[in-house]
Amino acid sequence: MPQVLLIFCLAGATNAFYKQWIPDTNYENKTNWDKGDVPCGSDRVQFSSQRKVSVFVETTHAVQEMMLPMDGEIILNSGAGFYVLSGQDPGCGAGVKTKFKDSESLHWYNPALWQAAATLNDLQDGHFLFSVHEESVPCQQDDVMFKALSSFRVDTSSSQTTIPVKSVSVLGKVFDSRLEFSEYLSSGSGQLQFHGSSAVTVGNPGCGDPTGCDCGNSVNHERICSAITCGSLSCKKPLLAMGHCCEVCGAIVTIHYTDGFNLQNYRERIRHLFLSLPQYKSIQLAMSKVLKPQRLMGIIPLGSLPEIQVVILDGETGKLSEALARDMIKDVKSHGSILGITGGDIQMASEPGNSAGTVVGAVFGVLIMIMLIVIVVVLIRKGFVQMPPMPSMPSMPSLSRFRRNTNVGDLNGEIHRGFDNPIFDKPDMLNNIPGTDSIFMTQTGVHFVNPAYDENEIDFTV
């Protein structure tokens, strides 16, 4: 019963997440320098003259020399600055020439460059969430965070003209007004921090549907996956979750629900009931609403069906993932009616494909096609449906035109019949020709006697 009561105490939970940009262009971040260390008092500092950059400086630094870019800015924290040493820095050594790394190739739609958390406290404490690749990037109902004491440069190019989000936080200031954030993007700092073909827009409403909302990043799926490198797998049947770029070993649970379902409540329920157990400590779980395309016989589009997809991973084997998936299905069978869940399905990477299920599906598809054909034929015979008229075929010339017509009187002249054959045109002339006494004519044709076979009197008819 305690697990049922948990549903009602979380009714005010939200379905939105906080997505934080990981890279920065901070002076104190040693990964931003080609020598792998922050410049010291004996070093000569160089920024590329042809690159745009916005650099945040948190403290005071000594340098020997600094070459600045043609178009850029240095944002100084309170009390921060630079000074030049007259001699060598005792703790720096002889000094080197160090260059600030290029940040032009950092893209908004790279899932590896974002961290997700359910709350701001989780974000600050490092309690990050696992998500499929499409949802690792900010969704249309998410709050986007750039670290307070930090600057950055991000390429926002995408398949759309705008990237809608709920809000954006830059340098500790939260922008949730579209007009105000548009003005910031037009400022010098905004143009240096955001660049690309698409404009980030804020003010998008949060998810108001308790059953969850679609992330909205499927249109940029190819762009998102272009930044991902998939590794090799050892499981029998790798699984590909919707919104993910790589096949995985583990389990996928599909939840079918009613209007009384609450996604955030169910997410918290799974966390308290199962993920808090010691045996599931290593589990990574991503739960979200997806719109699964429906197709008749796998070909004809029939729209999409909303489902809750739960992706469960625990490494290469997937054994723990499958155990958790079974526990979730047992919970659905026991308490599904209270949770607003009508059923659930499991896909497991350790089980080979079900050939029998494939055959049944193919047979079912053929039966549906036959039934549709029969229905159409019946409707045509009953007159409810009329077939479109067949295109007329060109008429063939009549054979009568090729017959000899002896009564053609409109030619105004006697028809020439060729040359005269004295044998066939004048039968009485045969008796006047020597050697033709054995040739005679009847109604059936012309007959003659072959001398070579005269004794047998073989009759040849022409």
Image (tube, helix red, strand yellow):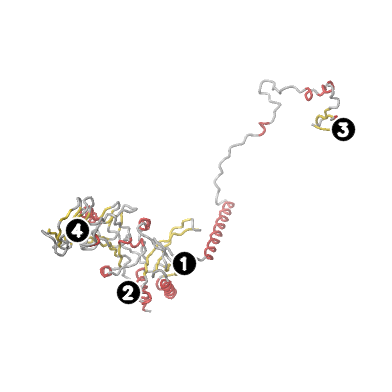
**Along the polypeptide, which appears first: circle 1 or circle 4?**
4
Amino acid at dot 3: Glu
Q: Which mark is residue 236?
A: 1
Residue 392 in sight in this render: yes
Count of number-bearing discs: 4
Query: Residue 289, located in which quarter of the rendered image?
Result: bottom left
Quarter that holds the C terminus:
top right
In front: label 1 or label 3:
1
- Look at mark 2 in the image and give the residue it sits on: 9
Mark 1 and mark 4: Cα distance apart in space: 53 Å
For residue 96, the mark is: 4
Q: Few, some or many C-alpha atoms within 10 Å of disc 2 (few <14, some 14-19, many ≥20)?
A: few
Q: In the image, which disc is placed on residue 457?
A: 3
Q: CA distance from mark 3 to mark 2?
A: 123 Å
- Whether residues under marks 1 and 4 lie with C-beta atoms below 8 angstroms apart, the answer is no
Position in image of residue 380 (x %, y %): 57, 51
Kind of element beneath mark 4:
loop
Amino acid under label 1?
Lys
The answer to whether residue 337 of the structure is visible from this angle is no
First in sequence: mark 3 vs mark 2: 2
Q: Position of residue 443 (x, y in %)?
A: 81, 30
Q: Identify the mark nearer the N-term, 3 or 4.
A: 4
Are dots 3 and 4 in contact, CB under 8 Å?
no
- Say the numbered circle drawn on residue 282: none
User: Is 431 rendered above or below residue 244?
Assistant: above
Q: Of discs 3 and 4, which sits in the foreground? A: 4
